[in-house]
Amino acid sequence: MQQSIIATVDIVLLTLQQQRLSVTLIKRDNPPFQTMAALPGGYIHAQEDNNCLDAALRILSTKTGIVPPYLEQLQTFAGIARDPRGWSMSVVYFALVASEVITAAQHDGLVVCAVDDLWHLPFDHNDIIAAAVARIRNKSYYSSLPCYLAGPMFTLPGLQKIYEACLGESLNKVSFRRKMDELNVLEPVSGQTEAHGAHRPAQLYRLKAQFKNQLQLLSRGL
Amino acid sequence: MQQSIIATVDIVLLTLQQQRLSVTLIKRDNPPFQTMAALPGGYIHAQEDNNCLDAALRILSTKTGIVPPYLEQLQTFAGIARDPRGWSMSVVYFALVASEVITAAQHDGLVVCAVDDLWHLPFDHNDIIAAAVARIRNKSYYSSLPCYLAGPMFTLPGLQKIYEACLGESLNKVSFRRKMDELNVLEPVSGQTEAHGAHRPAQLYRLKAQFKNQLQLLSRGL
DNA sequence: GAAATAGTGTCTTTGAGACAATATGTT
DNA sequence: AACATATTGTCTCAAAGACACTATTTC
């Protein structure tokens, strides 16, 4: 029969801070690694969680107060070596939110750190975050994924900056707009953005309602 | 504390039969669903498996006698509803092999069935296979993945047929060859293929040694 | 040499990127 | 009006697909 296996869910909650892809960490309440910052996570509760996605939503909600618009299973990290308590399995999800959502959550112990500036984290959380970032980088090339990092309304130049932060490279303005047009997930809002200075203000857009929770893909990448 | 959670690994072992993407099923030795065909799978053995990949290799080897050249984690399927024994977690891997490998394995109870002809399988194995097929379809567009479905030596027209079977659509010959050239994972073998009839025979190729176990990606898809 | 498929050359079309002209706000 | 950025038009270049021509084998 089976040895006891630790079954947990961890969430890589990503956002953009100062145009940099950043991850949300939380001070651990319990051992091991008590008081250290790590990915939000917790045990699966077989009594109350119908599946892993439920568990992820419950844990994220409990620990951070956030209900993300986009949550996707990343990968499962498991083995004898990753947790001092024993053989463990962590089903990892990743979520994207606008940074205001994290600020608004007002939860204690949350630390948002740029993924390029991370120190050594408990467990294999550095590997997990690296995998999440790689997934997002890749997916941003051919999908509407980065839109979830924007607030409810945004401008096209602003969205381009978000895409560029995800991809780590600058994009051609004309091509980017052609691709956004092709994605067909945005709709203009009547109002206009604040002009940051003495120049033409940009049109505000929002995600079409039907794409609030659903990714749209490009046939060819950016 | 934690209720007992069933921790298993399942493998979607895919191959090509008569140019059709097919999955390998195995008659179940134990309840539930004893004697029914299902995906090869088994419990994680915390004592002997260092991680999930180890478990997948062990299970695949034990149940089918196959050591696949390519094995990748697909996704974890978990929840209360998928297994009559209780809350279960299955980390699913997928593997690709040439059909001769399955024939050569000589294991009893193996059933190879085209993924489009499947009947209703135990657990959520139909969903799992569908997810694997979707992943392979997608990945075949921009990688050397389908090469693992070919034998040790193959012709370019033959490989194109394999790609077409994976993608479910026919491809442009010139473009396909340009892309294979770009992938740069193949090397010609001095010999030549059997001519199937009265016509020019095709050059035989094989995977370069360094790509025997490693995928190569295209910057843009096929 | 007729047939049939392998392999290659090249033209056409499509789409990405560069560049620049125009638009529209603020100061 | 000057300025600065938004937005759009258009040209150039690269890549994908269509087509057809050449190559090479068997019968």
Image (cartoon, coloured by chain):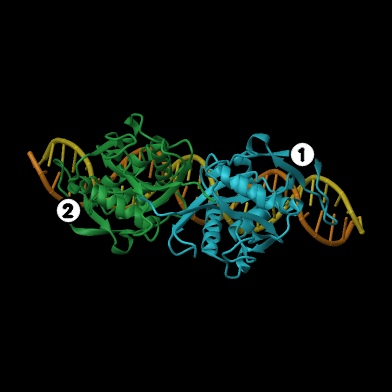
Chain colours: A green, B cyan, C orange, D yellow
User: Is C20 drawn above or below residue A186 in the view shown?
Assistant: above
Q: How many marks?
A: 2
Residue A28 horizontal/vertical position (percent): 28, 39
Q: Position of residue A210 (x, y in %)?
A: 32, 64
Dot 2 amino acid type: Gln
Examine the rendering and report whether any part of residue B11 can be seen: no
Percent x, y for residue A38? 32, 38
Residue reaching furthest front? A1
Is residue B122 in view from this perspective?
Answer: yes
Q: Nearer the viewer, residue A159 or B61?
A: B61
Element type where label 1 sits in the image: strand
Q: Is residue B110 left or right of residue A218?
A: right
Q: Which residue type carries mark 1?
A: Val
Residue A96 sits above or below residue A54 on the image: above
**Which mark is on residue B189?**
1
Q: Name the residue at 61% across, 56% down.
A: B40
Q: Image check: A18 left or right of B34?
A: left
Label 2 packing within 10 angstroms: few (<14), some (14-19), many (20+): some
Of B221 and B92, nearer the camera is: B92
> Where residue B201 appears, x then y in whole percent?
81, 49
Do the dots labelled 1 and 2 sit on one chain? no
Distance between the alpha carbons at the discs numbered 1 and 2: 63 Å
Rendered residue at 73%/58% (across/down):
B108
- The residue carrying mark 2 is A192
Q: In screen coordinates, is B199 left or right of A139?
A: right
State whether residue A91 is above or below residue B37.
Answer: above
Read off the chain for label 2: A
Residue in the image at 32% along x and 48% along y: A96
